[in-house]
Amino acid sequence: MDITQTLLPGVGVRYDMTTRKGVPISVVVHREGPADLCVSSKHDPDDVRLALHLDEEEIDALTDVLGAHRITQSMADVTRAIPGLETARLLVEDGTAFVGRPLGDTRARTLTGCSIVAIVRADDVIAAPTPADVLQAGDSLVAIGSLDGLEQLRTRLRTG
């Protein structure tokens, strides 16, 4: 079984796998302790069918059942720092130009060099959002990039 691991600096680590029946599963383990478990449609990996936000106690119980010893080694990467790369959570404020528009309209990577790696919406997390994901007021965008790029992105989200 192949599991891909993606370091999300300042956020944690995302693990992706596909079951033998073709169902995509993603787990984002946050540095602060909680985790998000997402199960997507096997026909469209962007169509999340189930999204669970788990606190530390729930994670402990679930890993006890599933065998925590298997993932202990891979958790060491969560705290690894990458020089020159920063993270930020940027709020999409009500009334700004990007509310109701697709993420791709921000042109974040093209104009600022930053990548948006997740959208936090209330209790849900959209890990690895696509350019087609529509932004809503109150969304928190998890972005990575240089300090200057993140500040440019923050300004762009406010002013459009």
Image (spheres, rainbow, N blue to C red):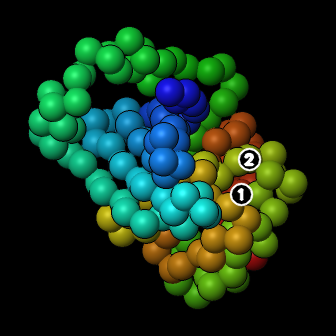
For label 2, the SS is: loop
Q: Amino acid at mark 2?
A: Cys
Residue receiving disc 1: 153
Tell which of 37 and 116 is nearer to you: 37
Residue at 63% x, 85% y is 100
Quarter of the view holding residue 42: bottom right
Tell me: residue 97, above or below residue 117: below
Tell which of 19 and 91 is nearer to you: 19
Residue receiving disc 2: 114
Quadrant, the C terminus: bottom right
State which mark lies toward you, 2 or 1.
2
Q: Is residue 9 toward the left or the right of residue 97 in the image? A: left
Measuring from the top left, give residue 159's x and y in whole percent: 72, 75
Give the spatial CA distance, label 2 vs label 1. Answer: 7 Å
Q: Residues within 10 Å of mark 1 (few under 14, many from 20)?
A: many
Residue at 37% x, 60% y is 51
Tell me: residue 7, above or below residue 153: above
Q: Is residue 120 visible?
A: no
Q: Is residue 109 toward the left or the right of residue 3 in the image? A: right
Residue at the extreme top: 73
Residue at 56% x, 71% y is 92
Q: Is residue 150 toward the left or the right of residue 29 in the image? A: right
Q: Residues within 10 Å of mark 2 (few under 14, many from 20)?
A: many
Q: Are marks 2 and 1 in contact (CB under 8 Å)?
A: yes
Measuring from the top left, give residue 124's x and y in whole percent: 38, 63
Tell me: residue 80, above or below residue 140: above
| Sequence-earlier tag: 2 or 1 | 2
Number of numbered discs: 2
Q: Amino acid at mark 1?
A: Leu
Residue at 61% x, 35% y is 86
